[in-house]
Amino acid sequence: MNETLKGRRVLILVEDLYQELEVWYPYYRLKEEGAEVIFVGTGRSKHYKGKHGYPLEEEKRVDEVIDESYDAVVIPGGYAPDLMRRCEAMVRLVKEAHERGKVVAAICHGGWMLASSGILQGKTVTCFSAIKDDLIHAGAKYVDQEVVVNGKLITSRKPDDLPVFCVELIKALA
Protein backbone atom coordinates (compact mmCIF):
# COMPACT_ATOMS: atom_id res chain seq x y z
CA MET A 1 0.00 0.00 0.00
CA ASN A 2 1.15 3.50 -0.82
CA GLU A 3 1.10 6.27 1.80
CA THR A 4 0.46 9.19 -0.60
CA LEU A 5 -2.95 9.95 0.90
CA LYS A 6 -2.33 8.84 4.48
CA GLY A 7 -4.42 11.01 6.80
CA ARG A 8 -6.85 12.01 4.03
CA ARG A 9 -10.54 11.26 4.50
CA VAL A 10 -12.79 10.82 1.46
CA LEU A 11 -16.58 10.46 1.40
CA ILE A 12 -18.14 8.49 -1.47
CA LEU A 13 -21.85 9.26 -1.79
CA VAL A 14 -24.14 6.27 -2.38
CA GLU A 15 -27.76 5.50 -3.14
CA ASP A 16 -29.62 2.77 -5.01
CA LEU A 17 -28.81 2.29 -8.71
CA TYR A 18 -25.23 3.54 -8.37
CA GLN A 19 -22.86 2.72 -11.22
CA GLU A 20 -20.71 -0.08 -9.75
CA LEU A 21 -17.41 0.82 -11.42
CA GLU A 22 -17.78 4.50 -10.53
CA VAL A 23 -18.03 3.59 -6.84
CA TRP A 24 -15.64 0.67 -6.47
CA TYR A 25 -12.80 1.81 -8.76
CA PRO A 26 -12.21 5.12 -6.88
CA TYR A 27 -12.82 3.34 -3.56
CA TYR A 28 -9.98 0.88 -4.10
CA ARG A 29 -7.63 3.36 -5.78
CA LEU A 30 -7.99 5.80 -2.88
CA LYS A 31 -7.49 3.02 -0.32
CA GLU A 32 -4.37 1.86 -2.20
CA GLU A 33 -3.00 5.37 -1.75
CA GLY A 34 -3.65 5.25 2.01
CA ALA A 35 -6.85 7.32 2.26
CA GLU A 36 -9.67 6.54 4.64
CA VAL A 37 -12.74 6.08 2.43
CA ILE A 38 -16.29 6.13 3.81
CA PHE A 39 -19.53 5.22 2.03
CA VAL A 40 -22.11 7.90 2.89
CA GLY A 41 -25.77 7.25 2.11
CA THR A 42 -28.94 9.27 2.34
CA GLY A 43 -30.07 7.22 5.34
CA ARG A 44 -33.09 5.90 3.47
CA SER A 45 -31.61 2.42 3.85
CA LYS A 46 -28.54 0.77 5.34
CA HIS A 47 -28.03 -1.26 2.16
CA TYR A 48 -27.93 -0.04 -1.44
CA LYS A 49 -27.76 -1.93 -4.72
CA GLY A 50 -25.96 -0.87 -7.86
CA LYS A 51 -27.48 -0.80 -11.34
CA HIS A 52 -26.46 -4.43 -11.74
CA GLY A 53 -27.50 -5.47 -8.23
CA TYR A 54 -24.09 -5.35 -6.54
CA PRO A 55 -24.67 -4.61 -2.83
CA LEU A 56 -23.03 -1.89 -0.78
CA GLU A 57 -23.47 -1.03 2.88
CA GLU A 58 -23.76 2.56 4.04
CA GLU A 59 -21.09 3.27 6.66
CA LYS A 60 -22.53 6.64 7.70
CA ARG A 61 -25.68 8.61 6.99
CA VAL A 62 -25.20 12.01 5.41
CA ASP A 63 -26.55 13.79 8.50
CA GLU A 64 -23.75 12.14 10.52
CA VAL A 65 -20.96 13.66 8.41
CA ILE A 66 -22.18 17.21 7.70
CA ASP A 67 -19.91 18.74 10.37
CA GLU A 68 -17.18 16.09 10.34
CA SER A 69 -13.69 16.64 9.00
CA TYR A 70 -13.06 15.27 5.50
CA ASP A 71 -10.94 16.21 2.50
CA ALA A 72 -13.07 15.21 -0.50
CA VAL A 73 -16.50 14.14 -1.68
CA VAL A 74 -16.81 11.73 -4.61
CA ILE A 75 -20.13 11.56 -6.47
CA PRO A 76 -20.49 8.48 -8.67
CA GLY A 77 -23.01 8.16 -11.45
CA GLY A 78 -25.64 5.69 -12.44
CA TYR A 79 -29.14 6.77 -11.49
CA ALA A 80 -28.16 7.20 -7.84
CA PRO A 81 -27.53 10.97 -8.15
CA ASP A 82 -31.18 11.48 -9.09
CA LEU A 83 -32.12 9.85 -5.78
CA MET A 84 -29.34 11.64 -3.87
CA ARG A 85 -30.46 15.09 -4.95
CA ARG A 86 -33.87 14.47 -3.39
CA CYS A 87 -32.10 14.39 -0.02
CA GLU A 88 -31.64 17.95 1.21
CA ALA A 89 -28.78 17.00 3.56
CA MET A 90 -26.83 15.36 0.72
CA VAL A 91 -27.22 18.40 -1.52
CA ARG A 92 -26.12 20.61 1.38
CA LEU A 93 -23.06 18.40 1.97
CA VAL A 94 -21.88 18.90 -1.63
CA LYS A 95 -22.53 22.65 -1.52
CA GLU A 96 -20.71 23.08 1.80
CA ALA A 97 -17.78 20.90 0.69
CA HIS A 98 -17.33 23.15 -2.33
CA GLU A 99 -17.68 26.34 -0.26
CA ARG A 100 -15.09 25.06 2.24
CA GLY A 101 -12.56 24.38 -0.51
CA LYS A 102 -12.75 20.60 -0.32
CA VAL A 103 -12.18 18.47 -3.41
CA VAL A 104 -15.51 17.65 -5.06
CA ALA A 105 -15.30 14.99 -7.79
CA ALA A 106 -18.25 13.85 -9.90
CA ILE A 107 -18.40 11.36 -12.73
CA CYS A 108 -21.13 10.57 -15.25
CA HIS A 109 -24.59 11.40 -13.85
CA GLY A 110 -22.90 12.67 -10.66
CA GLY A 111 -23.12 16.09 -12.30
CA TRP A 112 -26.80 16.17 -11.29
CA MET A 113 -25.67 16.67 -7.69
CA LEU A 114 -23.41 19.54 -8.75
CA ALA A 115 -26.33 21.21 -10.52
CA SER A 116 -28.69 20.69 -7.58
CA SER A 117 -26.14 22.06 -5.12
CA GLY A 118 -25.83 25.29 -7.07
CA ILE A 119 -22.04 25.27 -7.45
CA LEU A 120 -21.70 25.26 -11.25
CA GLN A 121 -22.09 28.94 -12.15
CA GLY A 122 -19.14 29.88 -14.37
CA LYS A 123 -17.39 26.52 -14.01
CA THR A 124 -16.07 24.44 -16.91
CA VAL A 125 -17.11 20.81 -16.42
CA THR A 126 -17.84 17.56 -18.19
CA CYS A 127 -20.38 14.80 -17.58
CA PHE A 128 -22.29 12.04 -19.32
CA SER A 129 -23.64 13.66 -22.49
CA ALA A 130 -27.29 12.97 -21.62
CA ILE A 131 -27.18 15.44 -18.71
CA LYS A 132 -25.03 18.17 -20.27
CA ASP A 133 -28.07 20.44 -20.75
CA ASP A 134 -28.82 20.21 -17.01
CA LEU A 135 -25.31 21.40 -16.19
CA ILE A 136 -25.42 24.16 -18.80
CA HIS A 137 -28.77 25.39 -17.39
CA ALA A 138 -27.12 25.42 -13.95
CA GLY A 139 -24.55 27.90 -15.29
CA ALA A 140 -21.68 25.63 -16.31
CA LYS A 141 -19.67 25.55 -19.50
CA TYR A 142 -19.77 21.96 -20.80
CA VAL A 143 -16.80 20.40 -22.61
CA ASP A 144 -16.53 16.84 -23.92
CA GLN A 145 -13.26 15.68 -22.32
CA GLU A 146 -12.14 12.66 -20.27
CA VAL A 147 -11.60 14.81 -17.21
CA VAL A 148 -11.91 18.50 -16.37
CA VAL A 149 -10.20 20.03 -13.35
CA ASN A 150 -11.59 23.43 -12.33
CA GLY A 151 -9.83 24.33 -9.10
CA LYS A 152 -10.92 21.64 -6.64
CA LEU A 153 -13.85 20.55 -8.80
CA ILE A 154 -13.08 17.42 -10.85
CA THR A 155 -15.51 15.97 -13.39
CA SER A 156 -15.48 13.06 -15.85
CA ARG A 157 -17.93 11.56 -18.35
CA LYS A 158 -18.17 7.77 -17.97
CA PRO A 159 -16.54 4.58 -16.61
CA ASP A 160 -13.95 4.58 -19.42
CA ASP A 161 -12.62 7.83 -17.92
CA LEU A 162 -12.03 6.36 -14.45
CA PRO A 163 -8.24 5.95 -14.77
CA VAL A 164 -7.63 9.64 -15.52
CA PHE A 165 -10.43 10.70 -13.12
CA CYS A 166 -8.68 8.87 -10.28
CA VAL A 167 -5.25 10.23 -11.26
CA GLU A 168 -6.61 13.79 -10.96
CA LEU A 169 -8.49 13.01 -7.73
CA ILE A 170 -5.37 11.54 -6.11
CA LYS A 171 -3.26 14.48 -7.37
CA ALA A 172 -5.74 16.97 -5.87
CA LEU A 173 -5.62 15.20 -2.50
CA ALA A 174 -1.83 14.60 -2.37
Image (tube, helix red, strand yellow):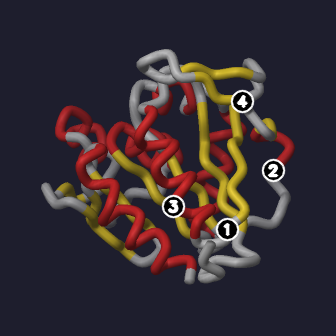
| Label 2 vs label 1, nearer the camera | 1
113 or 128, nearer to the observer: 128
| Label 3 vs label 4, nearer the camera | 3
Q: Is 38 drawn above or below residue 70 in the view shown?
A: above
Q: Label 3 is placed on what type of residue?
A: Arg
Instruction: Please give the residue where the numbered disc 3 appears in the rendered image.
Output: 29
Instruction: Point out residue 64 in the picture as x, y percentages from the top left corner.
Output: 86, 44
Q: Secondary structure at mark 3?
A: helix
Of callouts 3 and 4, the N-terminal one: 3
Q: Label 4 is placed on what type of residue?
A: Glu
- Mark 3, Cα crowd under 10 Å, few <14 / some 14-19 / many 20+, is some
Cα separation between marks 1 and 3: 9 Å
Cα separation between marks 2 and 4: 16 Å
- Marks 2 and 3 in Cβ contact (< 8 Å): no
14 or 164, nearer to the observer: 164
State left or right for residue 38 relative to residue 81. right
Of callouts 2 and 4, the N-terminal one: 4
Q: Quadrant of the N terminus?
A: bottom right
Q: Label 1 is placed on what type of residue?
A: Ala
| Label 2 vs label 3, nearer the camera | 3
Q: Quadrant of the C terminus?
A: bottom right
Instruction: Please give the residue where the numbered disc 2 appears in the rendered image.
Output: 65
Cα separation between marks 2 and 1: 17 Å
Instruction: Please give the residue where the numbered disc 1 appears in the rendered image.
Output: 35
Instruction: Please give the residue where the numbered disc 4 appears in the rendered image.
Output: 57
Disc number at residue 169? none
Q: Secondary structure at mark 4?
A: strand
Cα separation between marks 3 and 4: 19 Å
